[in-house]
Image (cartoon, grey):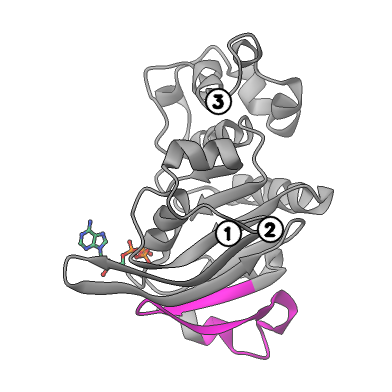
């Protein structure tokens, strides 16, 4: 379980995250919503250690990881699918996935595990193509496969539906649901596409100007008018 307790973050003098707390249990999809610029990406970067927090704590299975480097957090079990995907366009699909296995021994990190290609068959078909030749949706699937290659206990995704065609959005939703239901991973999903978020959410958190303004079980999103809170 990933637990975030009262974290604060600043860009210079701007107070971006204000006492943000949330819990992402194993076996659940924890969705973070909010309008543009409220601090969602900043929150994920703090979870990964890409940005430092000023106060508060981040616990992974009760262990404080908030002083760890991003590499140490990946070793501890966090994996990140960044907004915009950050695929290495000149490397092949296979080479991109193998980068996600860098924390393992050399012999293990030589081969892409078959189950990743079972999850995303299109990546198997295209494994010798360059990352830059893939469509946006295929690149998103590749970014998720690369993150899964590190065998995370917490999978963190920043707007995986952004700019993706509907059929691939459905596939990605199915994959995330299956991964959570298997019961060995917590998923933290930042998402602006409300219907996708509502369908997947076991629990939700809404941010507004860096503060949590609504939080609860996924099946209370309608009664709590979450869609209105995030409408542009
Ligand atoms: N490197 C930076 N330096 C200064 N301010 C920044 C920096 N990055 C982001 N900000 C500001 O911090 C605030 C939160 O940004 P953040 O990207 O976390 O929001 P977001 O909710 O993820 O937005 P979006 O939905 O547009 O991705 C915004 O006001 C943004 O302008």
Q: CA distance from mark 3 to mark 2?
A: 21 Å
Under circle 2, the secondary element is loop
Residue 20, percent across and down? 46, 75
- Camera-side residue: 15 or 181? 15
Q: Which residue is mark 1?
A: 59
The percent position of residue 91, horizontal first and vertical second, equals 42, 17
Q: Which residues are magenta?
A: 204-228
- Label 1 residue SS: strand
Q: What residue is shown at x 32% (from left), y 69% (from top)?
A: 37
- The tag on residue 1 is 2
The reply to whether callout 1 and callout 2 are in contact (CB within 8 Å) is: yes
Q: Position of residue 151 (x, y in %)?
A: 67, 34
> Mark 1 vs mark 2: which is more N-terminal?
2
How packed mark 2 is, by other alpha carbons closer than 10 Å (few <14, some 14-19, many 20 or more), is: some
Q: Which residue is labeled 3 in the image?
A: 103
Displayed quadrant of residue 197: bottom right
Drawn side of residue 27 relative to residue 142, left or right: right
Mark pair 1, 2: CA separation = 8 Å
Q: Are marks 3 and 1 in contact (CB under 8 Å)?
A: no
- Tell me which residue sits at (62%, 73%) in the image: 204
In the picture as drawn, the residue positioned furthest to the left comes out as 13
Mark closest to the chain's N terminus, 3 or 2: 2
Label count reads 3
Residue 157 seen in the figure: yes
Name the image quarter holding the C terminus: bottom left
Q: Earlier in the sequence, mark 3 or mark 1?
A: 1
Instruction: Specify whether residue 220 is painted magenta.
Output: yes
Residue drawn at (52%, 36%), measured in percent from left and top?
A: 143
Q: Is residue 88 magenta?
A: no
The front one of 173 and 109 is: 109
Left/right of residue 22 with respect to residue 56 in the rendered view? right
């Amino acid at each position: 379980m990933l637990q975030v307790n009262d974290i604060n973050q600043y860009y210079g003098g701007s107070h971006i995250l204000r006492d943000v707390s949330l819990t992402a249990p194993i076996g659940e999809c924890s969705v973070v919503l909010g309008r543009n610029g409220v601090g969602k990406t900043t929150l994920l970067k703090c979870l990964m250690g890409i940005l430092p927090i000023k106060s508060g704590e981040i616990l992974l299975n009760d262990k404080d990881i908030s002083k760890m480097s991003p590499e140490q957090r990946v070793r501890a079990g966090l994996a990140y699918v960044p907004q915009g995907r950050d695929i290495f366009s000149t490397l092949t699909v296979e080479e991109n996935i193998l980068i996600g296995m860098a924390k393992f021994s050399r012999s293990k990190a030589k081969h892409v595990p078959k189950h990743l290609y079972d999850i995303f068959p299109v990546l198997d078909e295209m494994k010798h193509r360059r990352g830059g030749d893939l469509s946006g949706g295929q690149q998103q699937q590749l970014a998720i496969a690369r993150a899964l290659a590190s065998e995370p206990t917490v999978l963190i995704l920043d707007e995986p539906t952004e700019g993706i065609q509907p059929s691939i959005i459905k596939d990605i939703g199915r994959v995330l649901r299956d991964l959570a239901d298997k019961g060995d991973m917590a998923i933290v999903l930042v998402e602006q596409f409300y219907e996708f978020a509502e369908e997947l959410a076991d629990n939700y958190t809404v941010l507004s100007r860096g503060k949590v303004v609504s939080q609860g079980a996924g099946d209370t999103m309608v009664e709590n008018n979450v869609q209105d809170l995030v409408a542009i």
